[in-house]
Image: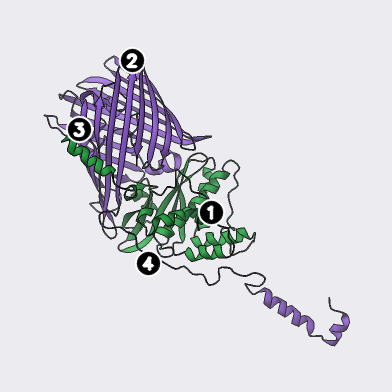
Amino acid sequence: MLPKSTYNRMPWIFPLLWGLGWSLSSLPAFGKEDPFAGVVPQRSEKEEGTDFLTENFAFRKELMSEFGADSRGEVSSRQSVGFEVQKKFSSETSTLFSIDFQARLVRRDGFTDAPNDMEGMTRPGWSFEVHNAYLDLYNPLGGVGVLNLRAGRFYLPFGLNLATDTHGSLLQLSNEMGFGFERDWYAGFWGSLGDTNYDLYYLAGSGYDLLFKGQTGLGALRLSLGNRYASEDGMEGGFSFLGGRRLSMDGSGVETQRIGIDGRLRGAGPFGPMGWTTEMAVGRDEGQDLFTQLHQFDYLHASRSWGLSAQYRRSWEEAVADSSVSAEATWYLSNDVGGSNLQWLKLNVRWPLEVAGPTLFTLQYYQYW
Amino acid sequence: MRYFLSSILAGLLAFPPQAFAAIGCTLNNPAEDLKYLFPGMTSYREELKEFGKLPNGRKAFEGLPARLRGELDKVYETYETAYTVYWIFKGKEKLGLVHGVNVPGQGGVIQVFLLLDPKTGAIQKFFFQRLESPAASALRAKAFRDQFAGLTLADFYKHDYYQAKDLKDPADKIGGITLPKTTSGKKDLQAALRGVRKNLVLMDLFVFGGMYEPFFERAQKVGVKALGGKP
């Protein structure tokens, strides 16, 4: 504080000091320096090294080595190498269409009815298998997402399989149990109407190979919850309807009607995500009533390095029932969230419940990258 | 025939791994999600981005830890991971771009999506697609997410400086964000914030030509200690 004598001699000193202090304190850099002064965004002109072929192009490789053994002493081996090609084609402002092709060269020795190898029953030795081969045409009538066209071979539009990649997994959903195949050749439409997704297709009904042996084919409609429910609530679900004449595994026609309901709920557990899946269908094959159901629990440790699953499945047709329960443990060497870089070792054990049969052990190594 | 098929497959398997893409984090239903974000849009275009296609992609990947201020996750953040960018159009006008990343949370995956200004890279909207967390409702709260609107990657690099110097300053926009109070989901909150930053860093590399690199370099010069990797 200044002495009173100073004020008496220089009465202007207080206003001057106050004004000087106020001016300095109001300067933005007073007492601190802006370390980013003069720094501005600056764009580099380097371009990505893409061309027509490599732009929006994905190529992935696959290795699978699987061994089965049952309590009756039967053993089996299934070894395969495969690949998948995905390519999207775009205009300047729009993604117009995409293609997906996925195939395997497989060598089978012996057969033990592994959960993911029903077709192995009729394919001993070498075989070349096409799993996916389809084209998606986006918004051909304009609008965005309301109507898209799909043609080719893909998962049956019945139950949760359209939303579930079971290409490499041992545990499968219920379509193979209900129809004898889980993929077919088809063409039709898919899209979203508000919070409802739809899939409407005509299917050849021949399953693994595209064959026409007098079957009329199948019509299929699936109505399912919009993706918002999966994102926000971890919930998927829908109703499926299918009817027509398909080919059975022995090549004869089967008059087929089905109505199905399905749901899957996923959520965070204390140590990692858990999920519950249910698929149920009622209908008729050649006039015979049937009922199939599948319930599955999955747990994945938060590290994504290991997981456990259990599945119960049952089919009933005109008083004949078959059911089993399976338990599975998986050790992941890599487990990319998008499912595009995977490497695992799985051990699956299946016990028959209502029909006498062997306990089956399946060991699988799988890599997809 | 068998020999022929085997030869084809053997040839395909011999492709160098960097030539192939792995889709990282995509919208479940792009058409519906993008229409919700941009009711006036007329079309969208997807672009797949990979480090392998960037000039000096390996160097850019090795520089990620310094820009994220933490080591990369071996499952979620690999060199091969590809990223899908959605450009949204009204006629021929670019309305924005949407991009998502996966980050590991305590209960599983967290998918952090950002809607960015196509010219400045500033956040217009921040939302979660997949969020397996006990703090899910707190993180999804609009009041929390809205605070990120207008922020750019420059704000994160500036925050590093203020944090390193332990300074409170109105210019530190990240430091001014009110975080949700959660005890059970603290790790998920940190993961979500890291996801926002990672998303911006990747878009700066893949889409905006390293526009905010000068801010990163200045932050390093003025004393922000590089963490986990080469700056």
The tint chain B carries is green
Badges 3 and 1, same chain: no
Q: Quadrant of the C terminus of chain A?
A: top left
Q: Are marks 1 and 2 in contact (CB under 8 Å)?
A: no
User: Which kind of residue does numbered mark 3 sit on?
Assistant: Leu
Q: Residue furthest left?
A: A214
Q: CA distance from mark 2 to mark 3?
A: 34 Å
Q: Which residue occupies 58% across, 65% down?
A: B222
Mark 4: secondary structure: loop
Quadrant in which the N terminus of chain A is drawn: bottom right
Mark 2, chain letter? Answer: A
Residue bearing mark 3: A218
Q: Which residue is mark 2?
A: A358
Residue occupying the far bottom of the picture = A9
Q: Which residue is mark 4?
A: A45
For disc 4, the neighbor class at 10 Å (few under 14, some 14 to 19, many from 20) is few
Residue A229 pos. (x, y %): 41, 41
Q: Position of residue A147 (x, y in %)?
A: 26, 47
Q: Amino acid at mark 2?
A: Pro
Which mark is nearer the camera, 2 or 3? 2
